[in-house]
Amino acid sequence: MRNNPNDLDSMPDPTQVSGNELAKSRDTRRRIMEAGRDLLAAEGFARFSTGAVAERARLTRPAMLYHFGSRADLLAAVTRFVVRRRIELFEEAVSALPLTESYKGQQFRALATALAWEHLDLPEFWAFTELVMAARTDPELAQIVAPAIAIFDRSRRELTTKVFPSNAYDMADFNLARDVVRFLSEGAIAQNTMTEDRDARIADLKHFLHMLVATTDGNLFLEAVVRNRKPQPPGEMAPAGPPSD
């Protein structure tokens, strides 16, 4: 499916081993990757260390050091593993959707919106979020995470355009709809600041996104936003709208 040299295939698989290593070495590396992912998801970036990952993977420290000689090496590998898994899981999910050539934009968008919420329960999402947030103030980590994020974003977009029927989306507002769904849903869950009536408010957000991206009125609104976009000169503020009640 993939033919872009800059997509997932350009990111090394950290579970791979060289030809002269035993097959069980790959199993061990995968255990390490899964342990690193789960540690990030459950305890956060601050708790990430070679010792903590080794303990979670039930490995001795020498066994861990055989595969990853430093925290930086381990962190780079776990980052690649998490991003690859998020892309692979997305590909598996969209490929399994019951799509036909008769699918139109609203049907596609309704399925894609539901899929976005489902993936927020996975450890890959929480590990990814921890890495992105930590990279904001950690320049060394940012050098690892930034290119991985670019591959993640590009690969998901390419997979969507290849898997779904060509008449299932309108490119005019495709990016806007995709960004609204992704960042509103991920932000709502990752910030975890809804302390009152959480279930009802999350349900309202899900319904809002469905109405916005999977109904005729919502699609017309998104198309109008894109059509009327006017870049603002640097340093110049857009005119203020009328005061709200």
Image (tube, rainbow, N blue to C red):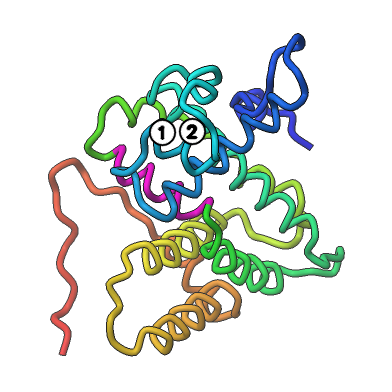
Q: Is residue 20 visible?
A: yes
Q: Residue at x 24, y 48 (%)?
A: 232
Q: Secondary structure at mark 1?
A: helix
When asked about the image quadrant of residue 12, the answer is top right
Q: Secondary structure at mark 2?
A: helix
Q: Residue at x 27, y 72 (%)?
A: 193
From this view, report whether residue 199 is shown above or below residue 107. Answer: below
Q: Nearer the viewer, residue 111 or 221?
A: 111
Mark 2 vs mark 1, CA separation in Å: 5 Å
In the picture of the structure, the residue carrying the numbered disc 2 is: 148
In the picture of the structure, the residue carrying the numbered disc 1 is: 145
Residue 109 picture location, percent across and down: 63, 68
Magenta-drawn segment: 124-135
Residue 135 picture location, percent across and down: 31, 37
Residue 132 picture location, percent across and down: 37, 43
Residue type at tag 1: Val
Q: Nearer the viewer, residue 124 or 201?
A: 124
